[in-house]
Amino acid sequence: MKQVLCCLLALLFTPTILAADMPLNMTSGVTEISNKVFSLHMTILYICCAIGLVVFGVMIYAIINHRRSKGAVAANFHESTKVEIAWTLVPFVILILMAIPATKTLIAMEDPSNADLTIKITGSQWKWHYSYFDQDISYYSLLATPREQIEGKETKGEHYLLEVDKPLVLPVNRKIRFLMTSEDVIHSWWVPAFAVKKDANPGFINEAWTRIDKPGIYRGQCAELCGKDHGFMPIVVQVLSEADFDNWIVEQEAQASAAAAEAQAALSKTLSKEELMAQGEQVYMARCAACHQPNGAGLPGVFPSLIGSPIIKGPVADHLDVVLHGRSGTAMQAFAQQLTATEIAAVVTFERNAWGNDTGDTVQAADVNQANSGASNGANTGADTAAEAVQSVPTPAAESSAAASSAAEESQAPVLDDLTMDELMAKGERVYLGHCAACHQATGMGLPGAFPALKGSAIATGPVENHLDIVLHGKPGTAMQAFASQLTPQEIASVITYERNAWGNNTGDMVQATDVNQQGQ
């Protein structure tokens, strides 16, 4: 009996290090917080095991030694004050002992102050969008598992459904603050190795933080049921040394410049229908098939079919507008910031000619750029021109090339035309909802303690020059980004006009693209 008791005690007080190696136990992770959570978990587990051992030990002892066959007579201690006090105080003391380390850990988990790096994480169906504050780096992270594996046509890989095309890249030994929100439904960003799990709610900003101890690749998933492809929304984090991370930042900036130059050059290129269809199929399978299905049939009652749909069969300008700017009130996202003009041209061409649609239309990058610029200007001329430029009747290659070159030349210089107040407000609302509402809220009320309200604020009702300066150049030490390189002068003029006249601000101020251009010089 003594040997059995000694074995139980040895098992109960096995060191935490050995417990971490148990395959079914919680992992200790690679951050200070994850280690604290693990230690708290083990502490509570040991307390629960001790309680269980005592309770079941007393029960077994009583059953064996006070059984009826031994002639035991039950004691009567009904309404014993001592027993009442004992079984009230003992659990109370145990709970206090458990609450002290738990409270310390929870307080540490909710302290994102003095961060070295801030990253906004935006969830949408079904991908993650990462924005690095102060570095002007932003990209989407999508599932990279081949569809052949998902459909069972190929052997599943080592990291099946836990691999992405672009991982989140973080440095070691730096405090990283996460701001989490959503574009549509509730998601949850969860990486077990960091002990970070925080909901991303539409219209709200949640905060979390981490400081990672060692480089490596760490994987997680969306931990909130967010729709039919909830299981296809993985998270991959690549952690680099501080020096490698700094080099990565430089590389990303260089790649962004190269991508911008490539996108600009693509506006003067004319691709064949075969090239557009091949690239369009790739884009469609990666970005559109999750909702509209690989065969374009959609899901009845949820996602519309693209086979013979009015959008596909109708004017090209309408098709481009839906892909570029999405459709409010539905799950259709805006892809203007997610895909290049060439990719949008290819996927629109593919959709208009696949599954028996056979419209014969081909769309070029210059057409997409012209349609996007036209929509940004609040005029219909760009969309009309795009519709005229892309006809079912094939256009001679020389004419297409000349039209593309002309569009590229026009796109090199920012549009500085003056707009009316109504045009500025309409466009400004679109820009605000697309770039500002995640932090300052659609109502302009902000989030107290995190993001200031714009309704009646000193910036939105004060001098226009101050308002322009903060939108153009951001505000160091805060989450306010610089939008000079993210928005056109006309978009900045529109959103400032909107902010100064929405939600009862009513300053009457109108800002034009020329004002923005002059302020930025």
Image (cartoon, rainbow, N blue to C red):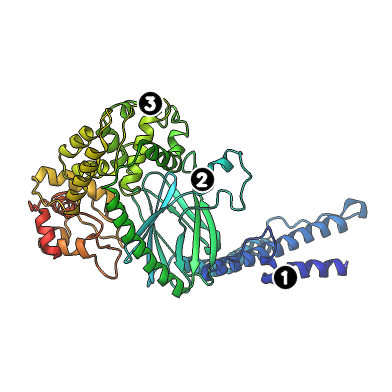
Q: CA distance from mark 1 to mark 3?
A: 69 Å
Q: CA distance from mark 2 to mark 3?
A: 29 Å
**Marks 2 and 3: which is nearer the front?**
3
Residue at numbered disc 2: 232
State which tag comes first along the sequence, 2 or 3.
2
Would residue 331 be visible to someone looking at this image?
no
Residue 49 in the image, given as x and y percentages of width and height? 70, 62
Query: Neighbour class for label 3 at 10 Å: few (<14), some, many (≥20)?
Result: some
Q: Nearer the viewer, residue 248 or 498?
A: 248
Query: Neighbour class for label 2 at 10 Å: few (<14), some, many (≥20)?
Result: many
State which tag comes first along the sequence, 1 or 3.
1
Looking at the picture, which amino acid does disc 1 mark?
Phe
Residue 373 in the image, given as x and y percentages of width and height? 20, 45
In the rendered image, which quarter is residue 50 located in? Answer: bottom right
Query: Neighbour class for label 1 at 10 Å: few (<14), some, many (≥20)?
Result: few
Name which residue lies at 47% across and 31% down.
Answer: 295
Q: Nearer the viewer, residue 497 or 485?
A: 485
Looking at the picture, which amino acid does disc 3 mark?
Asn
Q: Nearer the viewer, residue 516 or 69?
A: 516
State which tag comes first along the sequence, 2 or 1.
1
Name which residue lies at 47% across and 53% down.
Answer: 165
**Marks 2 and 1: which is nearer the front?**
2
Left or right? Give the position of 13 relative to 205. Answer: right
Residue at numbered disc 3: 357
Q: Secondary structure at mark 2?
A: helix
Looking at the picture, which amino acid does disc 2 mark?
Phe
Residue at numbered disc 1: 13
